Image (cartoon, rainbow, N blue to C red):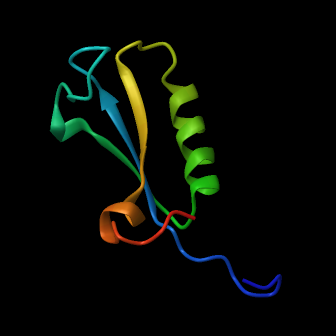
Amino acid sequence: MTASSPKPQLLHLVLGGELVDLHGHEFRDLSKVDVVGVFPNYESARVAWKAKAQSTVDNAHMRYFIVHLHRLMDPDHPEE
């Protein structure tokens, strides 16, 4: 990739909610899962994740996650 070519779009999803157990990934109520959005790269997804995670720091059961959608959509593609 040259310096002038754009970065490839590597989609990431940021979502979160209250967990049943602090050591798991099961949400207490799926109807209340907060879908923050889909982002074109990890860097922008991390900024959104950090903002949401920090805004819910008072609730120990709240967790936000970054899902690497590009890996699910094209699992055979080499990592970038």
Query: In the rendering, at what x and y percent does residue 22 appear?
Result: 32, 14
Given residues 52 and 41, the one toward you in this image is: 41
Which quarter of the image is occupied by the N terminus? bottom right
Image: 39 above or below 21: below
Quarter of the view holding residue 3: bottom right
The correct choice, above or below, for 56 with respect to 58 in the image is below
Viewer-closest of 31 and 7: 7
Q: Which residue is at a point 31% across and 62% down the rendered structure image?
A: 72
Where residue 31 appears, as percent x and y from the top left, is 17, 40
The residue at the point 46 percent across, 65 percent down is: 11
* Residue at the (42%, 39%) spot, across then down: 65
Residue 62 position in % (x across, y down) = 38, 23
Give the number of marks.
0
The structure residue drawn at horizontal position 42% and vertical position 14%, both measured from the top left corner, is 59
Q: Is residue 18 above or below residue 68?
A: above
Q: Position of residue 6 (x, y in %)?
A: 69, 82
Q: Is residue 30 left or right of residue 69?
A: left
Image position of 31 (left or right of 18): left
Image: 62 above or below 68: above
Q: Quadrant of the C terminus?
A: bottom right
Task: Identify which residue, 58 or 24, lies in the foreground.
Answer: 24
Answer with the quarter of the image where residue 4 lies: bottom right
